[in-house]
Image: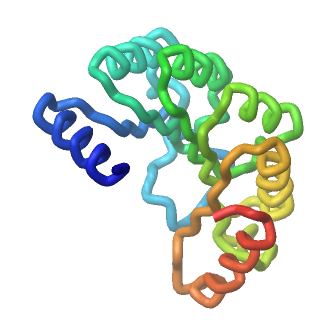
Amino acid sequence: MPGAASDALQALASAKNIPLLVMLELTSRCDHACGFCYKPVSDHGQELKPDEVLRVIDDLADMGALYLQLTGGEATLRPDFRAIAQHARSRNFQLSLSTNGERLDDETARWMAALPMASVQISLHAADPALHDELVGCPGSHARVLAGARRLVREGVVVSLVCTVLEQNLGQVDDLLALGKELGVS
């Protein structure tokens, strides 16, 4: 029974203070300028050094954590992003990524599928290209995000679209759901 097994795992993890799911923020840097973002933009100097990130991943694995979600800012902006992801997979984490989708070219999609990346959450804030681009402050973003999502789907990576609902895009929710269905994503 999946429910009973899950409940037992949660109870054991709670009793032993094991964090089963960890969101690891790799950077606060981002190539979007979303006015609604809660994250202050910081410079590279405030990031953990590569060896510090790997040590955190090792510590989490040694504690018994199972799921690791890499996030930011925009995690893929770190030059060592792939090395970090590969290290996490070598420690047997089920790995996921939260991204704005700007950097998902063909080669990256193939790499994520081969890793494998269990899932990728891509921010898309409107079905209307002009509105999305305005909200994120990045002309052409909507087209790049959709192209990246399609590449990942083609490679067999599980993709979810995520949206911050605002007054400006509230009327877009149904269209976003339809777009997700058309893309074959949740």
**In the displayed structure image, the side of residue 167 where residue 123 appears, left or right:** right
Place of residue 167 in the rendered image (x, y in percent of width and height, measured from the top left): 53, 86
Position of residue 172 relative to residue 89, above or below, is: below
Residue 32 can be seen, yes or no = no
Position of residue 115 relative to residue 132, above or below, is: above
- Looking at the picture, tell me which residue is in the foreground, 46 or 19: 19
Question: Residue at the location (58% across, 68% down)?
Answer: 163
Q: Furthest residue to the bottom? A: 171
Count of numbered circles in the view: 0
Position of residue 39 relative to residue 82, above or below, is: below
Residue 113 can be seen, yes or no = yes
**In the displayed structure image, the side of residue 174 where residue 58 appears, left or right:** left
**In the displayed structure image, the side of residue 181 where residue 23 appears, left or right:** left
Question: Residue at the location (80% across, 76% down)?
Answer: 130
Quarter residue 162 falls in: bottom right
Quarter residue 9 falls in: top left
- Looking at the picture, tell me which residue is in the foreground, 98 or 120: 120
Place of residue 106 in the rendered image (x, y in percent of width and height, measured from the top left): 88, 38
- Looking at the picture, tell me which residue is in the foreground, 118 or 123: 118
Q: Furthest residue to the front? A: 1
Question: Residue at the location (37% across, 19% down)?
Answer: 61
Q: Furthest residue to the top? A: 51
Place of residue 152 in the rendered image (x, y in percent of width and height, measured from the top left): 78, 46
Question: Residue at the location (49% across, 21% down)?
Answer: 92
